[in-house]
Image: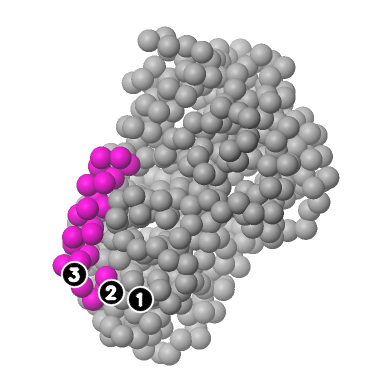
Amino acid sequence: MTDINATDITVGHTEGGLAELLRGESRYGHHWGVHRRWLRLAMPSERAFDTARALNMLCYGAAPDISISHDEIRQALTTDIAAMPVEQELLGSHIDVVVLHDPHTLGLAPVLAKLNLPVVWRLHLGTTTPNAYTRQFWSLVGSYLQDCALIIVHDQRYVPSNLGASVYEVRPGIDRLTVKNATQMEPSEARRELAGLPDRVEIHSDDAGSLDAADVLLVQLARWAPLKDPVAALRVATPVLNSLPTAHILLAGASSNTAQSDETLIATMTEREAQRDDLRRRMHVWSLPSDQNDKAQRLTGLVQCAGDVHLAMSRAEGYGLAVAEAMWKGRPVVGRDVGGIERQIRCCAAGYVATSNDLLSRFARQLAADPAMRSKIGSRARRCVASHGLIDRNVVEVAAALRRAVRRP
């Protein structure tokens, strides 16, 4: 087996599941003869930043939340992104294949093709329900695909059947050896430990009671972003807390220090403040550290372990590593019927999916009130991740796709 050298390129701040996935693939790829280098480029302009946001929303099948025309998007791809000094960054390196991550990096595909470098485009977003917005997306990016040897997606359903390009489906996997994923304990034990770490988190719900007073805890762990919809998580949890007087909910996530992140947190706190006193005291809202050191990972692992039932209320999700991580902890998940959330929960019979908040609340309450059911579903979820959802499989499949792109055995 011939070794290959791959360079991953991201443009702009990369966080969350994508950053974790790239670190894991880089850490283990050499075992399968793939040596990875991650080139992180700064966003070249405000227009390029807006283009990235707009393309992401269109790919998810939603209207962009900013005002930018299709002509401006095309200009950003062909000028702002394409003019980035990628050739200088790659100079002197032995590179067999370049992997572009997410839509806006496609502006670099023609540049890299002129350097005679095979290009793989890796799409981490998408929706299983195409609409007018997804058609606009493919219209905007379609011309760039002629410079790509192949496309890697999380779900074949995210791309049109008539795309005319080689498409590989590779579902991400979690790294069970990270501090976060290696942390395993019973919910009550994790809650006791978290109650003793107030200085490690930014607690916005300072009038809430003690977390270790909860008999059952609902958790949504997601960065503070509009698409993650923590307001919906509170609304789904409210009837559960109404019917179970010792149930609590914890919304926790890393802040990205952006206006969107701040607005999402404010909207969440506004929803919380509208609740009765007895409910509000059982609604916990935390910001977690955004770094990835061992202490921060341990804290995230404790939050995951603390939950008896995990919520995944994202309005759109390409894959949803947080869902896989909750399942790896042996916890059932109640989530929206979208993208990677739906696929993971259904494939593993790891909980429930629905589109309406009323149904989601009913499912969450059913699990919160039934420890035996939680244990049964949670055990099944963990076995499923152990069989199909670990990074070992993911790395092997990516290596095979990259070898196909450079036509090497």
Q: Is residue 204 left or right of residue 69?
A: left
The C terminus is located in which quarter? top left
3 or 2: mark nearer the eye: 2
Amino acid type at circle 2 is Gln
Q: Earlier in the sequence, mark 3 or mark 2?
A: 2
Q: Is residue 120 left or right of residue 197?
A: right
Q: Nearer the viewer, residue 105 or 208?
A: 105
Q: Are marks 3 and 2 in contact (CB under 8 Å)?
A: no
Over which residues does the magenta segment extend? 366-389
Residue 374: x and y in percent read 22, 65
| Type of colouring | one colour
Using a 10 Å C-alpha cutoff, classify the residue at mark 2 as few (fewer than 14 neighbours), some (14 to 19) or many (20 or more).
some
The N terminus is located in which quarter? top left
Q: Residue at x 42, y 54 (%)?
A: 341
Asked if residue 301 shows in the view, the reply is no
C-alpha distance separating marks 1 and 2 = 6 Å
317 up-or-down from 239: above or below: above
Residue 344: x and y in percent read 37, 51
Amino acid type at circle 3 is Pro
At numbered mark 3, what does the secondary structure look like: helix, strand or loop?
Answer: helix
C-alpha distance separating marks 3 and 2 = 10 Å
Q: Earlier in the sequence, mark 1 or mark 3?
A: 1
Q: Is residue 213 left or right of residue 47?
A: left
- Give the residue at mark 3: 371
Per the image, is 369 magenta?
yes
70 up-or-down from 89: above or below: below
Taken as a whole, is the magenta stretch helix, strand or loop? Answer: helix
Per the image, is 49 magenta?
no
C-alpha distance separating marks 1 and 3 = 15 Å
Q: Residue at x 53, y 31 (%)?
A: 167
Amino acid type at circle 1 is Arg
- Give the residue at mark 1: 362
